[in-house]
């Protein structure tokens, strides 16, 4: 790839660093996969036939996704194949199926339009959610909906043919389409939509394909066939790069490719830095089909189980105590050390089962997280009983989400103590259940010392904490430039939390995909964080990165970073240190 400085000018654009690595290639613009479906009124005798068409399309889509999963397993490894399970399970979802059939029966419309209407209704519900992680799951619904419509209309999704190293530019990219791609000549992804916790980002990381999301300006300026560089580690897109720029990034790509190879080889090796500091890598999971991937990816434990996801197949509310206990027992037993951190139901007024939803003007600042859980004592007590009973197979660390004040943690402690007494858990048995606070809002940062004294452990929810600290919605592309995990305010907040945990002699875990970015992992290491919990697919690369870093270098970097004024300055400083570290290896 070359670009003549006489005819084209090098241009750089910033976006979100969604998947690390450096990619070189020509721009290939991804066109929409299918035409919008037609609206057709059907005669009464056609209603049953249309419903049968939907059922056949779902069966066909399921078979195809099973094939995609096998292909993805071959490309990314067994430890990442679970990422396709939610899409396959969604095709069996009773709520989606019933909504489609109701549309056909009640409105007498064709199958394609019925699917479109049902999916749009679900998307509208997700659009209103304030929880960033849950809202980004709307992409999964859209993905399944588009596949069903393609099957019904006879317009299968077609993959672009990449005859030479190419970077895909698209408004958005479906996760399952990405999983279906052949990595040969696939050098990068640039999109307008998406976030670092979306399945598209996680799949890109599993494939080792550099990706930058939220880069609207780059999409507007890129023309088909233009040479470009994608730096997924720094969140940068370079069109028409000069030869000198290409030389610099070729060196970076070679270093990062070595790092990825080392990561795949070191999944079973200990997470120890070059200067002998031991780190602990844990896995975030949300559905039980992910459990087999935990140990394969080198996780030492389960660092976050999002318990609200056991409600996904329950149409009539929260599961009973027995069902919950069985789910938690399975999670604890599957953890490599038989210890699992279970976050209690993290609901808000807009994420409850539909029959229990309450209208609030601003759910993000309303009854959510620990507030909602404590306000619904019967639900909280039942969940605590289920978790405590499940510790017959190991240990549970109960995590209270979005803690804002000390009284919430104290109230949760009182409930847990009461439940343990009811169950007759005393002495060693009671110690198998611990209680911790998840620091996700600025108020919790400022009272981290008090929370540390009252809790058994602390966890940082980096996705939400960065969003709240910078007052920027991660799902809003207009403010995507503010998704800056190395912003001075973020680093200062992390520093306060680390100091609080250290002073109270309590364990601290960084929970979130932030650590998947090499510069962020370097900063977190320098701040004193030694426990990292991420999606299983991201763990091998993080382990390899940690094994190639020295804590003393990271501490020197952080000391300098905390004096800098902007995230860009911190990122540039990190790049200098990391480049020097690579030269010394």
Image (cartoon, rainbow, N blue to C red):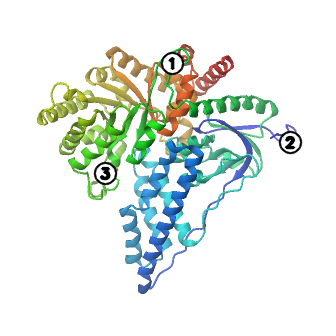
Q: Which residue is mark 3?
A: 352
Q: Residue at x 47, y 55 (%)?
A: 87
SS under mark 1: helix
- Cβ atoms at labels 1 and 2 below 8 Å apart: no
Q: Could you tell me if residue 193 is visible in this image?
A: no
Q: Quadrant of residue 18?
A: top right
* Image position, residue 178 (x, y; %): 59, 51
Q: Residues within 10 Å of mark 3 (few under 14, many from 20)?
A: some
* Image position, residue 554 (x, y; %): 55, 17
| 385 shown above or below 70 | above
The one of 7 and 98 positioned closer to us in this rendering: 98
The disc placed on residue 69 is: none
Q: Residue at x 24, y 32 (%)?
A: 408
Distance CA(mark 1)–CA(mark 2): 44 Å
For the image, the number of numbered tags is 3
Judge depth for marks 1 and 2 and give the one in front.
Answer: 1
- Which residue is the extreme one toward the right? 6
Q: Which residue is mark 2?
A: 7
Which tag, 1 or 3, sits closer to the chain's start?
3
* Image position, residue 217 (x, y; %): 66, 45
User: Does 558 sit left or right of 219 as displayed?
Assistant: left
Distance CA(mark 1)–CA(mark 3): 39 Å
SS under mark 2: loop
Q: Quadrant of residue 1?
A: top right
Q: Residues within 10 Å of mark 1 (few under 14, many from 20)?
A: many
Which tag, 2 or 3, sits closer to the chain's start?
2
SS under mark 3: loop
The one of 314 and 395 positioned closer to us in this rendering: 395
| 487 shown above or below 106 | above
Q: Which residue is mark 1?
A: 526
Which tag, 1 or 2, sits closer to the chain's start?
2
């Amino acid at each position: 790839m070359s670009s003549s400085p006489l005819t084209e000018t090098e241009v750089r654009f910033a976006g979100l660093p969604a998947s690390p690595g450096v990619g070189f290639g020509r721009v290939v613009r991804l066109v929409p996969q299918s035409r919008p479906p037609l609206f057709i009124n059907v005669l009464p005798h056609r209603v049953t036939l249309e419903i049968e068409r939907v059922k056949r399309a779902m069966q066909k889509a399921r078979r195809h996704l099973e094939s995609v999963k096998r292909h993805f397993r071959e490309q990314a490894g067994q430890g990442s194949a679970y990422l396709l399970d939610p899409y396959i399970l969604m095709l069996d979802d009773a709520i989606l199926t019933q909504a489609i059939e109701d549309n056909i029966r009640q409105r007498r419309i064709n199958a394609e339009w019925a699917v479109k209407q049902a999916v749009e209704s679900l998307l509208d519900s997700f659009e209103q959610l304030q929880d960033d992680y849950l809202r980004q799951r709307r992409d999964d619904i859209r993905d399944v909906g588009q596949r069903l419509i393609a099957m019904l209309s006879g317009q299968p999704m077609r993959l672009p043919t990449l005859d030479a190293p190419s970077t895909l530019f698209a408004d958005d990219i479906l996760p399952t389409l990405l999983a279906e791609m052949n990595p040969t000549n696939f050098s990068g992804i640039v999109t307008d939509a998406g976030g670092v916790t979306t399945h598209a980002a996680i799949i890109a990381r599993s494939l080792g394909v550099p990706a930058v999301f939220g880069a609207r300006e780059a999409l507007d300026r890129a023309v088909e066939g233009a040479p470009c560089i994608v730096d997924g580690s720094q969140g940068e897109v370079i069109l028409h790069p000069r030869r000198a720029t290409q030389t610099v990034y070729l060196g970076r790509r070679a270093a990062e490719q070595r790092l990825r190879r080392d990561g795949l080889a070191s999944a079973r090796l200990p997470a120890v830095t070059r200067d002998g500091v031991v780190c602990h890598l844990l896995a975030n999971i949300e559905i039980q089909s992910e459990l087999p991937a935990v140990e394969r990816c080198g996780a030492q434990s389960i660092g976050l189980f999002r318990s609200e996801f056991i409600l996904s197949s329950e149409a009539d509310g929260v599961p009973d105590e027995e069902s919950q206990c069985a789910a938690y027992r399975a999670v604890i037993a599957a953890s490599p050390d038989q210890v699992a951190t279970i976050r209690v139901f993290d609901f808000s007024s807009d994420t409850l089962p539909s029959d229990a939803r309450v209208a609030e003007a601003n759910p993000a600042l309303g009854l959510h997280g620990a507030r909602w859980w404590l306000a619904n004592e019967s639900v909280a007590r039942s969940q605590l009983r289920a978790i405590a009973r499940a510790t017959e197979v190991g240990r549970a660390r109960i995590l209270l989400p979005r803690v804002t004040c000390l009284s919430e943690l104290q109230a949760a402690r009182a409930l847990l103590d009461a439940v343990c007494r009811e169950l007759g858990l005393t002495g060693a048995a009671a110690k198998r259940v611990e209680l911790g606070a998840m620091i996700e809002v600025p108020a919790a940062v400022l009272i981290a010392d008090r929370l540390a004294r009252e809790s058994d452990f602390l966890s940082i929810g980096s996705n939400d904490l960065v969003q709240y600290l910078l007052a920027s919605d991660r799902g809003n592309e207009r403010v995507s430039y503010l998704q800056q995990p190395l912003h001075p305010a973020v680093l200062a907040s992390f520093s306060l939390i680390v100091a609080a945990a250290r002073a109270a002699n309590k364990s601290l875990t960084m929970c979130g995909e932030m650590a998947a970015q090499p510069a962020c992992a370097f900063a977190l290491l320098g701040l004193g964080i030694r426990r990292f919990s991420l999606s299983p697919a991201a763990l091998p690369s993080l382990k390899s990165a940690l094994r190639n870093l020295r804590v003393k270098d990271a501490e020197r970097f952080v000391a300098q970073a905390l004096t800098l004024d902007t995230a860009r300055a911190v990122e540039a400083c990190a790049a200098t240190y990391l480049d020097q570290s690579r030269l010394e290896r």
